[in-house]
Amino acid sequence: MHQMHIRRVAIVGASGYSGVELTRLLARHEGVSLTHVFSDTWQGQTTNETLGIEGAVAGLRYQSLSEAMEASGCDFVFLATPVSASLDLVPKLLAGPARVVDLSGAFRFKNASDFKRGYQIDHPHVGLLEHAVYGLTELCRSALRSAQLIANPGCYPTAATLLLAPLFASQLLTLDGVIVNAASGTSGAGRTGDSALSFSEVTGDFRAYKVLQHQHTPEVEQTLAQCAGSPVPVTFTAHLLPVARGILATAYARVRTGVNEKQLFDALQEAYAGSPFVKVLPSPNAVGLKRVVGTNQCHVSVALQTQGLDASRLVAVASIDNLLKGAAGQAVQNFNVANGWPESLALTGGETKGSLT
Amino acid sequence: MHQMHIRRVAIVGASGYSGVELTRLLARHEGVSLTHVFSDTWQGQTTNETLGIEGAVAGLRYQSLSEAMEASGCDFVFLATPVSASLDLVPKLLAGPARVVDLSGAFRFKNASDFKRGYQIDHPHVGLLEHAVYGLTELCRSALRSAQLIANPGCYPTAATLLLAPLFASQLLTLDGVIVNAASGTSGAGRTGDSALSFSEVTGDFRAYKVLQHQHTPEVEQTLAQCAGSPVPVTFTAHLLPVARGILATAYARVRTGVNEKQLFDALQEAYAGSPFVKVLPSPNAVGLKRVVGTNQCHVSVALQTQGLDASRLVAVASIDNLLKGAAGQAVQNFNVANGWPESLALTGGETKGSLT
Amino acid sequence: MHQMHIRRVAIVGASGYSGVELTRLLARHEGVSLTHVFSDTWQGQTTNETLGIEGAVAGLRYQSLSEAMEASGCDFVFLATPVSASLDLVPKLLAGPARVVDLSGAFRFKNASDFKRGYQIDHPHVGLLEHAVYGLTELCRSALRSAQLIANPGCYPTAATLLLAPLFASQLLTLDGVIVNAASGTSGAGRTGDSALSFSEVTGDFRAYKVLQHQHTPEVEQTLAQCAGSPVPVTFTAHLLPVARGILATAYARVRTGVNEKQLFDALQEAYAGSPFVKVLPSPNAVGLKRVVGTNQCHVSVALQTQGLDASRLVAVASIDNLLKGAAGQAVQNFNVANGWPESLALTGGETKGSLT
Amino acid sequence: MHQMHIRRVAIVGASGYSGVELTRLLARHEGVSLTHVFSDTWQGQTTNETLGIEGAVAGLRYQSLSEAMEASGCDFVFLATPVSASLDLVPKLLAGPARVVDLSGAFRFKNASDFKRGYQIDHPHVGLLEHAVYGLTELCRSALRSAQLIANPGCYPTAATLLLAPLFASQLLTLDGVIVNAASGTSGAGRTGDSALSFSEVTGDFRAYKVLQHQHTPEVEQTLAQCAGSPVPVTFTAHLLPVARGILATAYARVRTGVNEKQLFDALQEAYAGSPFVKVLPSPNAVGLKRVVGTNQCHVSVALQTQGLDASRLVAVASIDNLLKGAAGQAVQNFNVANGWPESLALTGGETKGSLT
């Protein structure tokens, strides 16, 4: 790539699962000079010691989070931090020249009331919400070019919204409510010491959690409403899967009178014709975790019930790797677009590793 | 138990996963003399050699399926056979004195058209359908007493119907369609040589299968319609979980105007007040596989959305062990009731093993 | 069982995995009145709330560990506590009439130096070591009858010692060192918040830990030396398996000149002829976790290399459920023998659940 | 890479797990033109349809194995076939100009008697054995340059031999026998319909298989004897792990008098100083599957017992991905060396995907 300006980049919260993936992706990114990684857990160690990173940044040492404002000299700062830390850091960083990609839920909402519904606290920087670009890449490429603050979407909302947005945007679905029944691997909960997430507890189990109270519900509703031009009620249920990585979202909605299955596929195909990371598969039965885990891809498909008692009901399925397209991968994809680069930079090569068997 | 008539019992299809569970349960049942086990796979071996069974039937040898009519001299015959074998054997067995518990889908439907919808063949013995008792124990105890043919329910329908039947019977739900999003462990597919069910393929994966085409859809619709007194459209999606045993069903419906969450719980509590194997838990978040796997229990719970864009939507969750309450355990429960015995005979003692950690 | 004196029993440390299994086993034990369960984690809750226990002790509430001396009024106290808590409680409890079964490593050694080698602290109650009975049931039944303090063996030593003790006792093996390569499920590490034991980290992984530094090495050496009448060097390596429960130990040793494979099997068969829980299988290939998990059984087998470069080398394999035969099950087995009762009381019925598929 | 001659390459047996990995690796290899893929299972489909391959070979269609001799026009043919197919194809292919990399066990032995010991048949092409280069890359780079037939090592032998070869070559170990206790993920058994390898059977289990009868024993003995200059008896036990991919080998041997742990590490470090894929880790506790799965790396480490009853015993541990360094990855590594290219071509970039969490 000729005349590519190398960006100076920092990662705050580099030892969590998303932070680790960011480090791996950015360490091998041809347009990146990774200058700082911040993590209290790994403070003082090098990326080679923690992750086996080789090459130019093998010797880069983790710094304390308390030193995170050193990142203000960078061109880009990635925050893989909890909401509270992002709420604190983002305004300070935006006071300088750095552009920020925040992977937390701190700046994803346009309305402070939705934030409060999801996170149970009053938003301390309401004025920043309108300036943040909600970084579901496939829906916001042009806005990303000049974004100073990119709010990287949640993992479940990424899968659910990529699946449903084109169908609502094409006015193919009724507005009387969509159901998203989704399941995630345990890495979605982060690197945690919660004994409920221990191997002994999770293996052999499957259960719903936060039923009717998950913070990702308003996030999905916000984007689908933008696409549909009207409010779209979402009932979202998260389940914990005994796998390390991956999200499968199974969605249910009704089509408007006269809509057929081909129109559904056409809407998806057209929406993602120029998108390297979204693949429309011919049947929901073909959408699974294995082909997407380890990649930045999202697989989607749909089927329409055309006979029986409930014709007009559709079943749509999407799958992603929650740490890549659902977090760090999409963050890098947004970063690429924000720089005017091809959006797959540093994000390909690994696809062939998606299915581990 | 005084004056219990010991029943002579045979199992046909004894080496499949359901057949194995039947053998274990009936071998220790105080009211049973297990006289025949039929399996081509294990022909000539003893139950001690295959399953480590000890005691009276340790030396019982498996016979070829071609000898299955020897079972006609028994009081009860359990068929853990494919639909085709059950269609063949049931009429022959019913010509004699034996009562039959069929674990296949061969005789579960009242209408031959529903059978054809689920299994794509014409039913060869339509006359028998009306005489078969659909053995979802908690809903059919009185009919079981005199039943000559008990059609044991499917695994998914057991979970979904126990969860929803009381809510429809109490007229708490609207009739515009219920969604059942369910996931099963791999043992539900039987002891199979299908490489798609190999450990290499299943571990780390999660996917839907037979989307909009699963044979259990009409089975759930049949029973819910009986409860509701009107047709209930069901959209059912099965998923394959990377666990060996267990089904979790997450259901979505709408309550009728004015119905509140307490009424939903009351309906469930009242329906199962005298049922030793169905437990109503206070939150859907508490319903998981681990507490029910290894037991004949079904756990159910429900939550009602009361605010937001889609108030009136309920989320209900049920879990069972697909091989016990979803197959062999319920078959023994039905057998107990059919004999006028306590329905938990030979089915307790194991509960404390449900959670393996 | 006529004229059985019901024992008043307490469990200290009742919320750990071993404590939970003890609670389940003792709650259904016909000779036990469970009067106290102590756990800070579950203080104030009932056994029904935490474990779904039904019947007489469903309402028994957990008390704080600080109240554990209330257990001194019981006939038996089971300690499922860390070494430090056992070191504190055992002398106090033994001052009263209660007999104690300690599941920790606090009193397993005859020599304080072995304790120090394994646990890196000086033993504070050396005088008690000689009075403790090392409770590997099959090797110490007569001593258990009058034991005041039963030191329940470690999980790995139970598997390794049951496998090798008869071979050393029969003088069939050389004394130049035995290798025990063992692997355990994650429940062996207890109910822990260690993120290294989270599902995300453990699934898909396998590794050795505490290489050459595991505290169970001197424990195995102590018992094998007693059997052999001479010191037996043991090289023991523990590995962490991605399963919840179960231990498989693969051992390597050399036979003395002229010893053949039949003699090895004969020694095992004779040693365990009257032991209901140890089964000698015809081939090491048949020894696995599934058949023993959920039971108090130990499966053992052996094979002797008779040709090639290294004839005289044997490979022996044993499997147990680490929480049952490796902890709580063996504790109850010891308790049964200590009371002069059949050693399988409350420990059978579950075998048929061993293999979950 | 300037002036690289593009090689025309074919893969026979392209739908097995090793064949799939070969296809992925070679499809993105800058020095390869993949011209033929042979598989009866996938005959007629394209690599895009089966594996999602994109780019130049997305449209390449699988041909029947009966057409495999069309590969004779290629520069290189990779055989990911069973022993019987390789025995048939190799002589025919070598009659032409193509160089062959055979992933089966057909040509790994120098002595036909070792082949017969491992595979129970007489070798039909004994004359070819001496010309085959045993392709454990790190030990045979110079021979690979002119090799017409490269016998790619077995998965277990790769891990065990890389771990032990430098220690024997440096004369640090005694010759009285080494024990290799190893465990493999299920993909090592291939894409199989064996119900014993179904998810239902394998999850939660762990067991040894082919005890004292595994065909990889003579393969390890052959190479270690070459390194040591004397016969080295090997006792090897394989175990089946409930993971999809990865091998961990734990080896036990004795050091010669006076040898210390530093000498062991020095021997490993020196042996692999110029090897990009073998990493010597500071402790056996650090060697696990997760860091190597998805990569071509081999991690090794060692610890020496210096006190206690059995000083001089060492414990050494190695881990690899059985399908990459243990099969397809090493095959490509050998191909690179055979062409005089950097040995990591097409094999890097993926390392950072090794640990999936």
Image (tube, coloured by chain):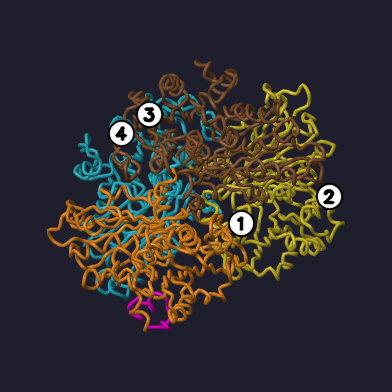
Chain colours: A orange, B cyan, C yellow, D brown
The residues bearing labels 3 and 4 have C-alpha atoms spaced at a distance of: 61 Å
* Kind of residue at badge 1: Tyr
* Kind of residue at badge 2: Lys
Q: Look at discs 1 and 4 and give the one toward the viewer.
A: 1
Question: Which disc, if any, is residue D214?
Answer: none
Asked which secondary structure carries label 1, the reply is helix
Q: Which residue is mark 1?
A: C17
The image shows residue D300, relative to residue A228, as above or below, that is above
Percent across and percent down for residue D227 are 67, 31
Asked which secondary structure carries label 3, the reply is loop
The residues bearing labels 3 and 2 have C-alpha atoms spaced at a distance of: 71 Å
Q: Which residue is mark 4?
A: B90
User: Quick check: D270 left or right of D247?
Assistant: right
* Chain at tag 3: D
Q: Is residue B30 something that shows in the picture?
A: no
The residues bearing labels 1 and 2 have C-alpha atoms spaced at a distance of: 27 Å
Q: Are marks 3 and 4 in contact (CB under 8 Å)?
A: no
Q: Which residue is mark 3?
A: D74
Query: Dot 1, how many residues are within 10 Å of its Cα: few (below 14), some (14-19), or many (20+)?
Result: many
Q: Which residue is mark 2?
A: C110
User: Quick check: D135 left or right of B78?
Assistant: right
* Kind of residue at badge 4: Val
User: Quick check: B10 left or right of A203?
Assistant: left
Range covered by the magenta-colored residues: A109-126
Give the quadrant of residue A341: bottom left
The residues bearing labels 1 and 4 have C-alpha atoms spaced at a distance of: 47 Å
Percent across and percent down for residue A307 are 17, 51
Percent across and percent down for residue D325 are 52, 40
Q: Look at discs 3 and 4 and give the one toward the viewer.
A: 3
Q: At 23% from the left edge and 52% from the top edge, which residue is drawn? A: A303
